[in-house]
Image: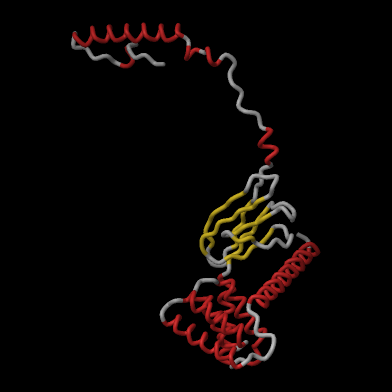
Amino acid sequence: MTARPRLRTLLSLTLVAALLSAGLGNAADARWTPPAAEPSKAALDEAHARYIAGNRAVEQGRWADALVDFEKAYALSGVPSALFNVATTLRALGRHRDARDAFALLLRRHGAKLDAAVRKDAETMRAEEAARVAVLVLDELPDKAPQLRVVVDGAEAPDDGARPLAIEVDPGRHALRVEEPRSQTFTWEGTCADAERRSITVRLASRATLAALPDAPKAEGASSGIWTSPIFWTVVGVVVVGGAVTGGYYWHRGRQVEPQAGFVVKL
C-alpha cells in the first residue's frame, strides 16, 4: 500500500470513529436527561427517596431495581451523583456499552463540578468499560434500504449505511438476524469475548432464485425400475433359496461356509 492510500484509509477510519462517538453521545443525551428547569422541592424529595431506595437495592444485590431508582433520581434532580450511580450499576450488570456511555455523559455534562477523585474514578472506569466492548462486523451486507432490518438479540440495530456495518455489543452470546423481503432471512449465533471484533459474512439468498431452482429430476420409468421388477425379485428368491439349501448341506457335514465360497448373496 502506497503512502497516499494508507493516509486516505487512516482519515476514513478517523472520520468513522468521530461519527460513531457523536452518535453514541446523542443517544446517551436522549436517554439520561436532567430536568429542563429548576426542580421543585417535591421533585427533589422524590429524587432523594429514589436515591436511598437505589442504595438499599445495591446492598441487597438487586442491581436491576437499583438502576431504575438511580435513573429516576437523575431525571428528577439532575444531580451528578445519581448519574454516577447509574453508570456503576450498569457496570455491575455487565452492560459495558451503556456503562461507558453513562460515564462519558457524566464527564461531559458534569465533569467540571465533580470532585477530583470522583472524576478520576469516572475516567478510569469509562476507559475500562470501553475496552470491554465487542464489535460485530457484518461483511457483504446489501446497501442500506428501508426494507433491510438488522436485528441483534431481538432489538433492531441502527444501520448508518456504512459497509461493512459495525455493531457494538457486550461480551457474551448473541443472536443476529438480517431480514430483507426479497431474500431468505440470514441468522447467526455466537459468542464474543471482551474487545473482540467478530467478522460475519452475511449471505442473503434471493427468494426468486431459490424458487426457480428445479426439483431433482426423477428417473424415467422409476416406478417400473429394477427394484419393483417381479422378475428381479424372483431371481433373487431363487438364488437365496438355492444358497440356503446348499448352506444347509454343508452345515450338516460340519463344514464352515466361508464368505468367499460364493454362498453369500450380495444385493
| Count of marks, rendered view | 0
The residue lying furthest to the front in this view is 42
Q: In which image quadrant can residue 189 be found?
A: bottom right
The reply, left or right, for residue 244 in relation to residue 43 is left
Q: In which image quadrant can residue 150 be found?
A: bottom right
Q: Residue at x 64, y 75 (%)?
A: 31
Between 205 and 128, the one nearer to me in the picture: 205
Q: Residue at x 64, y 59 (%)?
A: 137
The reply, left or right, for residue 36 in relation to residue 118 is right
Rendered location of residue 250, percent (x, y): 23, 9
Rendered location of residue 251, percent (x, y): 21, 11
Q: In which image quadrant can residue 197 be found?
A: bottom right
Between 84 and 250, the one nearer to me in the picture: 84
Q: Residue at x 47, y 15 (%)?
A: 227
The quadrant of the image that shows the C terminus is: top left
Between 105 and 247, the one nearer to me in the picture: 105
Rendered location of residue 129, percent (x, y): 56, 75
Q: Residue at x 48, y 76 (%)?
A: 65
The reply, left or right, for residue 160 in relation to residue 121 is right
Rendered location of residue 163, percent (x, y): 72, 57
The quadrant of the image that shows the N terminus is: bottom right
The residue lying furthest to the right in this view is 4
Colour style of the rendered protein structure = secondary structure
Q: Please, is residue 112 above or below residue 200 in the view?
A: below
Between 252 and 84, the one nearer to me in the picture: 84
